[in-house]
Image (spheres, rainbow, N blue to C red):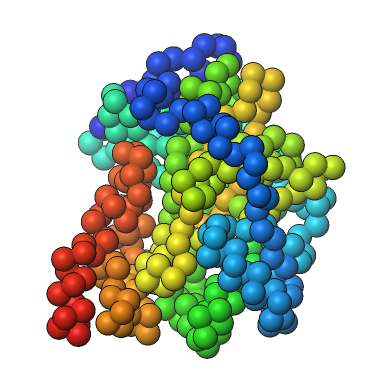
Amino acid sequence: MVHQAQGLLVQEVAADGELPSRYVLKEQQGRPAAAADAQRAAPSIPTVDVDRLADADAGEADKLRSALASWGLFAVTGHGMTDPFLDAILGAARGFFHLPMEAKQEYRNVVDADDGGRKFQPEGYGVDRVDTDEQVLDWCDRLYLQVRPDDARQLRFWPTHPSDLAELLKEFSVEGEKVAKLVVTAMARCLGFEEGFFLDKVGERMPSYARFTYYPPCPRPDLVHGLKPHTDNSVVTVLLLDEQVGGLQVLKDGSWVDVPVLGDGRHQLLVVVGDEMEITSNAAFRAPIHRVMAPGEEAERVSLAVFYQPEPDRVLEPSPELVDGERPAMYKKLQAKVFADGFWDAFALGERTIDFLKVKVDAVDQATAAVSGA
Ligand SMILES: O=C(O)CCC(=O)C(=O)O
Ligand SMILES: [Fe+2]
């Protein structure tokens, strides 16, 4: 059974110019406007040159260490993807979302179920999962696709229009994977480990999922979440932002901080630390909570996130090398697939997967482990 609101695309709601109550946050639910003042004097986000990281440049490694410690995300340069290429992929994404609704129907994420009804499934085009009447819905539609490994692609969800979208996405995910691996390698070095330390644990094959998100014009961006506060379901995420319309905010030291657009048509590419890295590193690196504000009435916004995940059969746990009496394991062991699947349940509730699946070791357990040397 699928919730009746599952079938409603935000793009269609936006076309009516109304703001139905399903999208409106209650005052105590952290409306975006309430945080607006806190960001004014905020410092700009750090930048790391991944090309220099690849050369094991010590100064760049220091920048990475500091970016990870204070932000958990950073802008990347030296990734080799050109502005025209990044422009083309976001352009193709806009082209897809602007297709007539009939043309997008065949990629819908609500499909026929075995019981004769309809069911939601993560891949495809539509809105995020709706479980209950109480759930406040985000002001965005998305297209979600598994990109790697190649043989796991469900091509029936891959749009054939715009005709270059699929090829551009494949190329982006390959280039993004290089960035992700360089960063994960450098993160191992930051902690004094061999380069393959994290990659060996999560698996070289790193399945990846792409999420194109479309935020339609919104009559009251102060009352809704474009995308609700969350941490990512990934080891690391490579995130390409709309080059004209801002909206991404990261929670830093208790305040929401804007990630600004660069201007002049330049494209901002970010790396975001995800939950699976937080667990594997025993919180040496933390996944930042971030959200997106909906655009105003005159604007729309697109983004492309590619989530690089651990191989599903891997055990997800704090690396034993990062656990000792002084720093006991902060998370319980579980299968990577269980964690990745739990993300969808948690996200619908607006919770972190780590909290929803009760992966955190509580203080009492930690004290016992420290005493027993476990
Ligand atoms: O649209 C954005 O800028 C961010 C999207 C995001 O956080 C995500 O897809 O996980
Ligand atoms: Fe995210």
Q: In screen coordinates, is 247 left or right of 233?
A: right
| Quadrant position of residue 257 | top right
Q: In which quadrant will I find the C terminus?
A: bottom left
Q: Is residue 91 above or below residue 313?
A: above
Q: Is residue 303 above or below residue 323?
A: above
Residue ID at (42%, 78%): 201
Q: Residue furthest bottom?
A: 194
Residue ID at (65%, 41%): 41
The answer to which of 174 and 51 lies nearer the viewer is 51
Can the viewer see residue 87?
A: no
Residue ID at (28%, 75%): 328
Indicate the position of residue 339 as horizontal and vertical percent values: 32, 59
The answer to which of 133 and 159 lies nearer the viewer is 133
Q: In screen coordinates, is 326 left or right of 207?
A: left
Q: In screen coordinates, is 364 left or right of 249?
A: left
Residue ID at (69%, 60%): 47
Q: Is residue 328 above or below residue 245?
A: below
